Amino acid sequence: MQVYKSIWRDEGMVPNTLAIGYVLLTYIGGWALLLLQAWWSVPLGILAVAHGMVIAAYLLHDCGHNALLRKVEHNIWLGRWMNVITGSHYGTYEDMRYKHMRHHVDNCEPVAFDYRAWLLARPRLHKVVRALEWCYIPAVELLMHAMLIAAPFIYESKRAQRGRVMRVTLVRFTLFALVLWFAPWAALGYAVAYCLFLTFLRFMDSFQHNYEIFYTLDTPDQKPPYKGNREYEETNTYSNLLSERRPWVNLLALNFSYHNAHHTKPNMTWYRLPAFHQEIYKGQCPQQLGVWGQLKSFHQHRVARVLAEEYGSVDVRESVRDGQAVGVNALSFLTAF
């Protein structure tokens, strides 16, 4: 027990073990409920699998910051397994981490692929994507998952990942095909759970920053204009608490909503963020957003967000309050491209 306790940072054995246990319970238990294919078990299984993947994604995020375990290699090991559970391991954990670290260091949204221009060049596909997004199907995110599969065959820098991505794709598609054949309601339930999972991540991501997009992910020598500018980082980062009066509600997103606190100390683990947020702002965070304005904005502009580039000039606090915030991205942080 002492050895196990010693591998965690900041006395994190109990909270992190509980979080990982929750992921395993909800994901495996949720699949068991889906496979029962009963009228009552499928809805429960959908919610369980979806939220298990949500928590796995935020644990993956903290592993990327080496915030959970003392040794880097242990964070990598756990992060890779969380990447598997989230279904985003068509791209590597290392690529996801690299992009996210660039986001923190460069104070921008660094990307390699301009999906907006790509969609505009294909009007029919663009119409389909917009229709799916109107129906709350995260088509842009799913499209980027497909691009992660295709990337090793398009980009020379990803060539070494060809064998890996073929194996991952073959295994995942074969398993899903077997479930679809033997338990079609379970397959449908997983598809719904995955859409709910991605929608939740996108909701949390949409209003946390007002950064500009720079197509510099594959060109690290280019210096974005706000790189290292802490004042710019703070004034263009927002804390979107799910509840201020009931802090436990923010555990639904593993405290990811305390986003200004996270950007102040990126390697601080998730269970210390609420107290750190209070220490910094004393209950008066000027960058805090109201949840109802976010919900209204997210719903009203779910289609416009596909091509929107509301970066660098709009005060998110005002637009969210009025329900007019389009949002800064149609993607979650899991898209490492």
Image (spheres, helix red, strand yellow):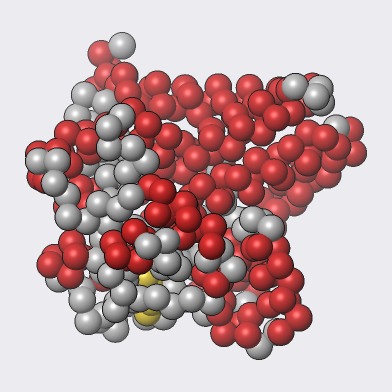
Give x and y (percent) for residue 196: 60, 45
The residue depicted at 47 percent of the width and 22 percent of the height is 21
The residue depicted at 38 percent of the width and 47 percent of the height is 291
Q: Is residue 14 above or below residue 222?
A: above
Nearer to us in this view, 86 or 328: 328
Q: Quadrant of the N terminus?
A: top left
Would you say 241 lies left or right of 268 here? right
Nearer to us in this view, 18 or 159: 18
Outermost residue, right side:
181
User: Quadrant of the rendered structure where residue 153 is?
Assistant: bottom right
The residue depicted at 64 percent of the width and 63 percent of the height is 133
The residue depicted at 54 percent of the width and 62 percent of the height is 300
Give x and y (percent) for residue 222: 29, 83
Outermost residue, top side:
1
Q: In this view of the protein, can residue 217 be seen by the observer?
A: no
User: Quadrant of the rendered structure where residue 162 is?
Assistant: bottom right
Would you say 149 lies left or right of 315 here? right
Give x and y (percent) for residue 239: 28, 51
Give the number of marks.
Answer: 0
